[in-house]
Image (cartoon, grey):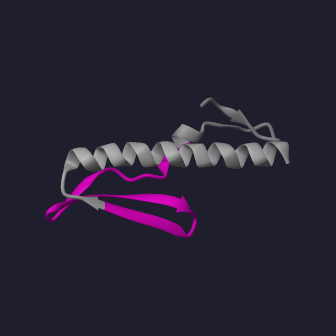
Amino acid sequence: MGIIETRFGTRVDPNRIALGSASNVIKQGAFFVFSLRVDNDDVREYSFTSRDRAVAMRKVLVSHLANKITDGMKKIVNG
């Protein structure tokens, strides 16, 4: 995915937006936790017992969020 230009001339990078919407993986008690802001009022928190699994899932979810942002931008630009 590359940089998308909006109708207003603004260029956005969906990958950077998605990375900014995800927190770092931190250890809370026996779990490794991170949160992902999907929408303004939709924040999801995920917890795993393994740091490797948490990092891998964060990477997958960030890529899914970047795809969602790209699709949303394409609808705005084309619509």
Q: State the image quarter where residue 49 is shown.
A: bottom left
Q: Residue furthest top?
A: 2
The residue closer to the viewer here, 78 or 24, is 78
Name the residue rendered at 62%, 29% in the picture.
Answer: 2
Q: Which residues are magenta?
A: 17-46
In the figure, is residue 76 to the left or right of 39? right
Percent of width and height locating residue 45? 37, 64
Name the residue rendered at 15%, 65% in the picture.
Answer: 29
Q: Residue furthest left?
A: 30
The answer to whether one can see residue 19 in this image is no
The answer to whether one can see residue 3 in this image is yes
Name the residue rendered at 43%, 52% in the picture.
Answer: 22
In the figure, is residue 63 to the left or right of 55? right
The residue closer to the viewer here, 61 or 36, is 61
In the figure, is residue 58 to the left or right of 73? left
Percent of width and height locating residue 20? 48, 48
Name the residue rendered at 60%, 36% in the picture.
Answer: 13
How many marks the image carries: the answer is: 0
Percent of width and height locating residue 56? 32, 43
Q: Is residue 49 magenta?
A: no
The residue closer to the viewer here, 2 or 50, is 50
Q: Residue furthest right?
A: 79
Q: Quadrant of the N terminus?
A: top right
Percent of width and height locating residue 7? 82, 41
Q: Is residue 33 magenta?
A: yes
